[in-house]
């Protein structure tokens, strides 16, 4: 047990601590921005980012992944906060955590098996675009000064150039320190972290939501909590899958569901908003050398320490420096090879990827984009498998017995094709349908088999079925009607 604890926490101390500091600095402006989106005080997002990062580090299922307050979750909260206030948001956050724990207990994390690679790629590309777009207000309009662009360019030079000289310290951290130092030394007049909102001046305290515990409250918060739980788990599971690929290590998706739930309960009890995994900060963490649970724990604790005790210094960090870091995240997150592979990949895969990107970018709703992607993947797969059906036949020398051989999968998309493969008007005495190399999946398939048998019998042929596998035979025994006395009437709806 001690060995496992050391492996998951203390086997990469230097890399995790430095990466955690970088992530903490990147979390501050985003937590404030997401608080503003949700319509709450900045400290609600900052407290949430602290508690969620620390708790998921301890109980989550994906070492090295960063969880905190996120934009996707903030968008869901807007209406609840506007109509009912912060206390109801805190209550919804607690219920979100309970629902996520239940999801983990029922092993719903396994549903990630149904998310195709095309959906994951689309999700990643959409998030990269959203991260990039979220930085544009900082370099456009009144903020578009030569000083901002110079600071941004200098930050990018440090981020991409320093690794060629040394990798001892993460280049994003050097970027933030150097750019902040220059801005303070020369007194540059430019937008800083402190301009985004007031930083908290005290540690969080236990705070039970001041709402009546009755059915009316549940009716108000449950729709929001259910949506938050789904969006949070989707983004967390997708992010975990991406980090799995980046680090070539597995993660426990069901434990992550529970971890996210416990974290949201914890954050709701200290006045924080619900959150989930963040792909941008997770990528920053991995690219900065963070791999273990210590990196997420460090990010959370350093974040709280900086905003409470070093608020005067943190408030002077130029937003342009953080924009440079987020640009690095956007460029590094986007799957550039997916654009080049659009012509190489099957059209269905490309359509799924593009549709996922478009819906997420337009709606800013990750759940909608992923849901559409999964649905399209399922439809394309069903159509493709349904097309792989072959029905051949041989006629006996006497000309009175035809044997059909069925090869493939029979279910709702291939049922009509299955029926069309038989000649019911042929004048024969006996028909044998060999299903040794076929499989029947659903009641639509069984209904199509009923129709074939009954149509042959109606034409005067003796029909026999051979080769049914055990699973198909079980469905036939339970749902088929061709051997029932009133088979024809039941099948035809009389």
Image: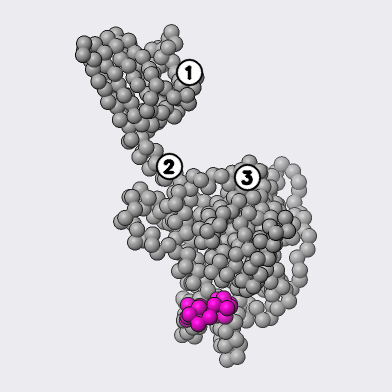
Q: Residues within 10 Å of mark 1 (few under 14, many from 20)?
A: few
Residue 409, by quadrant, is top left
Q: How is the image coloured?
A: one colour
- The residue positioned 59% from the left and 50% from the top of the image is 253
Task: Indicate which disc residue 378 carries.
Answer: 2
Q: Residues within 10 Å of mark 2 (few under 14, many from 20)?
A: some
Quarter occupied by the C terminus? top left
Q: Is residue 166 magenta?
A: yes
* Left or right placement of residue 311 versus residue 446 in this view: right
How far apart, in angstroms, are the residues tagged by discs 2 and 1? 28 Å
Q: Residue at x 64, y 78 (%)?
A: 315
Query: Does residue 164 appear anywhere in the picture?
Result: yes
Label 3 residue SS: helix
The residue shown at (76%, 48%) is: 212
Location of residue 213 with respect to 472 vertically, above or below: below
Q: Provide residue 270's location: percent of width, then percent of height.
A: 74, 60
Q: Which mark is residue 103?
A: 3
Q: Earlier in the sequence, mark 2 or mark 3?
A: 3
Disc 3, disc 1: CB below 8 Å? no
Residue found at the far front of this picture: 3
Give the secondary structure at mark 2. helix
Relative to 481, residue 286 above or below: below
| Residue labelled with disc 1 | 477
Q: Position of residue 44 (x, y in %)?
A: 68, 64
- What segment carries the magenta color? 157-175
Considering depth in this image, is 66 or 250 the residue closer to the camera? 250
How many marks do you count on the picture?
Answer: 3
Is any atom of residue 99 visible in this view? no
């Amino acid at each position: 047990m001690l060995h496992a604890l050391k492996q998951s926490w203390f086997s990469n101390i230097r890399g995790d601590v430095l990466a955690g500091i970088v992530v903490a600095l990147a979390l501050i402006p985003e937590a404030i921005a997401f608080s503003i989106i949700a319509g709450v005080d900045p400290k609600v997002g900052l407290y949430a980012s602290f508690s969620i990062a620390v708790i998921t580090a301890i109980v989550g299922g994906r070492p090295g992944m960063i969880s905190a307050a996120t934009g996707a979750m903030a968008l869901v909260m807007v209406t609840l906060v506007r109509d009912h206030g912060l206390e109801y948001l805190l209550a919804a956050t607690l219920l979100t955590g309970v629902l996520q724990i239940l999801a983990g207990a029922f092993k719903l994390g396994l549903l990630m098996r149904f998310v195709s690679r095309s959906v994951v790629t689309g999700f990643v590309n959409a998030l990269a675009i959203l991260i990039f777009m979220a930085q544009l207000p900082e370099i456009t309009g009144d903020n578009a000064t030569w000083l901002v662009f110079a600071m941004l360019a200098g930050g990018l030079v440090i981020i991409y150039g320093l690794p060629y000289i040394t990798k001892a310290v993460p280049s994003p951290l050097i970027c933030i320190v150097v750019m902040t130092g220059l801005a303070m030394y020369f007194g540059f007049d430019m937008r800083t972290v402190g301009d985004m909102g007031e930083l908290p001046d005290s540690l969080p305290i236990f705070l039970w939501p001041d709402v009546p515990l009755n059915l009316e409250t549940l009716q108000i918060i449950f729709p929001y909590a259910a949506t938050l739980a789904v969006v949070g788990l989707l983004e967390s599971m997708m992010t975990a899958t991406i980090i799995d690929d980046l680090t070539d290590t597995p993660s426990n998706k069901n434990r992550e569901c529970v971890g996210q739930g416990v974290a949201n309960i914890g954050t709701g009890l200290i006045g924080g908003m619900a959150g989930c995994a963040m792909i941008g900060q997770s990528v920053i963490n991995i690219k900065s050398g963070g791999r273990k649970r210590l990196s997420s724990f460090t990010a959370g604790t350093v974040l709280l320490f900086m905003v409470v005790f070093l608020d005067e210094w943190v408030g002077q960090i130029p937003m342009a420096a953080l924009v440079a870091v987020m640009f690095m995240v956007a460029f590094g997150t986007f799957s550039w090879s997916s654009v080049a592979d659009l012509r190489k990949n099957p059209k269905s895969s490309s359509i799924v990827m593009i549709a996922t990107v478009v819906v997420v970018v337009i709606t800013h709703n990750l759940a909608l984009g992923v849901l559409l992607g999964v649905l399209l993947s399922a439809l394309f797969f069903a159509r493709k498998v349904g097309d792989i059906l072959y029905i051949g036949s041989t006629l006996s020398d006497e000309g009175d017995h035809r044997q059909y051989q069925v090869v493939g999968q029979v279910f709702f998309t291939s049922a009509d094709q299955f029926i069309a493969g038989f000649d019911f008007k042929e004048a024969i005495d006996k028909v044998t349908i060999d299903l040794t190399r076929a499989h029947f999946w659903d009641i639509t398939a069984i209904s199509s088999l009923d129709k074939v048998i009954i149509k042959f019998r109606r034409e005067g042929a003796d029909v026999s079925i051979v080769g049914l596998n055990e699973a198909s035979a079980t469905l036939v025994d339970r749902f088929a009607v061709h051997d029932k006395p009133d088979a024809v009437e039941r099948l035809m709806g009389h």
